[in-house]
């Protein structure tokens, strides 16, 4: 007697058709087309879960940059100042503060500027004083 494993095959096909629910025309009714459609959809979903992270990070950077430039500071200098001040807030939180709480974000800008000035002063103090040069007479 030939064993077809029909129960498992039918279950697998039903699962695929169920996953294709909401697709148009053959793609939601026929296994062959539903399988292709679901496979492609899953590839797009996998790719775009990663793309979404990049897209949101870029959006947060744009929002932070707009708020910092309004205060006369560039995005990169602001982030450098936050790092120097040892303020560990991620870009998502910073962008939210920039959009919703300008007073708190202004305070962060002041802290970053102060930290940058202290960093520059420390770097200038660490440099040796240049030796005086004598001009030929």
Image (cartoon, rainbow, N blue to C red):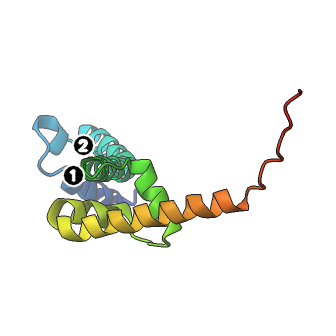
Q: Are marks 2 and 1 in contact (CB under 8 Å)?
A: yes
The structure residue drawn at horizontal position 41% and vertical position 61%, both measured from the top left corner, is 113
Q: Which residue is mark 2?
A: 34
117 over 36 or under it: above or below: below
**Secondary structure of the residue carrying numbered label 1:** helix
Q: Which mark is residue 17?
A: 1
The structure residue drawn at horizontal position 18% and vertical position 39%, both measured from the top left corner, is 27
Location of the C terminus by quadrant is: top right
Q: Position of residue 88 (x, y in %)?
A: 44, 72
Locate residue 28: give its quadrant: top left
Q: Nearer the viewer, residue 116 or 59?
A: 116
Q: Nearer the viewer, residue 94 or 127?
A: 127
Q: Position of residue 57 (x, y in %)?
A: 35, 52
The structure residue drawn at horizontal position 25% and vertical position 52%, both measured from the top left corner, is 67
Judge from the rendering whether residue 110 lies leftward or rightward of residue 124; answer left or right: left
Q: Nearer the viewer, residue 25 or 72?
A: 72
Locate residue 26: give its quadrant: top left
**Secondary structure of the residue carrying numbered label 2:** helix
Location of the N terminus by quadrant is: bottom left
Q: Which comes sooner in the sequence, label 2 or label 1?
A: 1
């Amino acid at each position: 007697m030939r064993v077809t494993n029909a129960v498992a095959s039918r279950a697998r096909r039903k699962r695929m058709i169920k996953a294709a629910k909401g697709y148009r025309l053959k793609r939601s009714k026929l296994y062959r087309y539903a399988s292709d459609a679901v496979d492609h959809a899953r590839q797009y979903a996998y790719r775009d879960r990663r793309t979404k992270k990049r897209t949101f990070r870029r959006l947060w950077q744009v929002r932070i940059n707009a708020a910092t430039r309004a205060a006369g500071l560039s995005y990169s200098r602001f982030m450098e100042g936050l790092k120097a001040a040892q303020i560990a807030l991620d870009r998502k939180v910073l962008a939210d503060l920039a959009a919703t709480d300008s007073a708190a974000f202004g305070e962060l800008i002041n802290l970053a500027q102060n930290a940058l000035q202290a960093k520059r002063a420390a770097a200038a103090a660490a440099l040796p004083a240049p030796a005086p040069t004598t001009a030929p007479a």
